[in-house]
Amino acid sequence: MKNSPKKPIRVLVVDNHEIFRIGLREGLSSTSEVTVVGEASNGNEALSKARHLLPDIILMNIGMPVMNGIQTSLEIKKSNLTSKIIILTHKTEGDTVFSAIKSGAMGYLLKDISLTELTQNICKVQRGEPAFTPSIALEALSLIASPGEHKHSEPHPLTPREVEILQLVAEGKGNKTIADELTVSEATVSTHMNNILTKLHLSNRVQATLYALRKGLSSLS
C-alpha cells in the first residue's frame, strides 16, 4: 500500500500591510509544504480567524493596530488553541523578542528571510522545534541568561533524568537524538518533556531552553 500524500501545513497570515500579506500568501501557496487558509490585518481579526480556521501555524507581525502580535499571542494561548505562532517582523530589540517568547511564540523570524528559509522554518515549528533568526536567538539568550552568581539560587522540581533531558533540549537536540543518546525510546523522552513543561509551567521547548540557560542547567550558559 502506498503512503498517503502528506497534508500541507495550514497557515494563517497576520499582518497589517496588505501588499506584504498578498506577497506572502502567493509565495507560500507556490510551495507543496504549505497552504494559506486565511489572512488577518490586526490582532482581533487574527484571534477570530484562528478560532474559526484552526490553522497549524500563525505567521504574525508584531506592530499591528487594535491588538499587537504579542497581545494576540497571549490571547491565543489563553484560548487553548493548538496553533503554533511564528513572529515575522522587522523588530530586533531583545526585550521584544523576550516578550514574544513569553507570550508563547515558537519562532521569531525577520522579514528579510527567503521564501525557502521561511518554509523550512514553518516545517520546523510544525514538528515542535523552535525557529529563530540566528542573530535574534543570540540576542534573546544573552538578555535572559542570569549572571553566574545567581545560578541555581532557586530549587527546581525536576528529577535528575528530567534535568538531563532539559540540558540536551537546551543544546538544540530533538527527541530522537536525545532518545538515541540516552538509549531510551522517543515516547519516553516525549513523556519526560511533557512532565518538564508541566512542572515548570512552561508552554514549549523554547521557554524550556531559556529556563535552562537562566538556571545554569545548560552547557551553553
Image (cartoon, grey):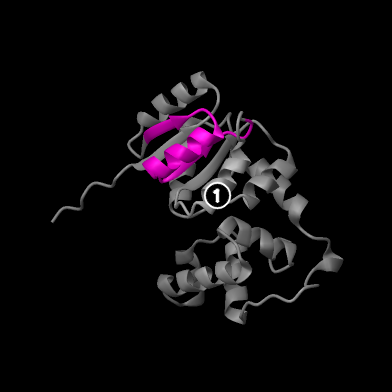
Figure quadrant of the N terminus: bottom left
Left or right position of 28 against 44: left
Residue 128 in the image: x percent, y percent?
Answer: 47, 55
Would you call the spot at circle 1 few (<14 residues within 10 Å), some (14-19), or many (20 or more)?
many
Total count of labels:
1
Along the viewing direction, whichever of 72 and 152 lies nearer the viewer: 72
Q: Residue at x 58, y 64 (%)?
A: 169
Q: Residue at x 70, y 36 (%)?
A: 92
Q: Which of the pair 36/189 is nearer the observer?
A: 36
Q: Would residue 179 be visible to someone looking at this image? A: no
Q: What residue sits 59% from the left and 38% below the top?
A: 69
Amino acid type of the residue tagged 1 in the rendering: Met
Q: Is residue 107 above or below residue 88?
A: below
Query: Horizontally, is 22 left or right of 95 in the view?
Result: left
Q: Is residue 37 visible?
A: yes
User: Residue 119: where, in percent of width, then height?
Assistant: 44, 38
Is residue 121 depicted above or below 149 in this figure?
above
Which quarter of the figure has residue 60?
Answer: top right
Q: Residue at x 58, y 30 (%)?
A: 111
Residue that carries the numbered disc 1 in the rendered image: 106
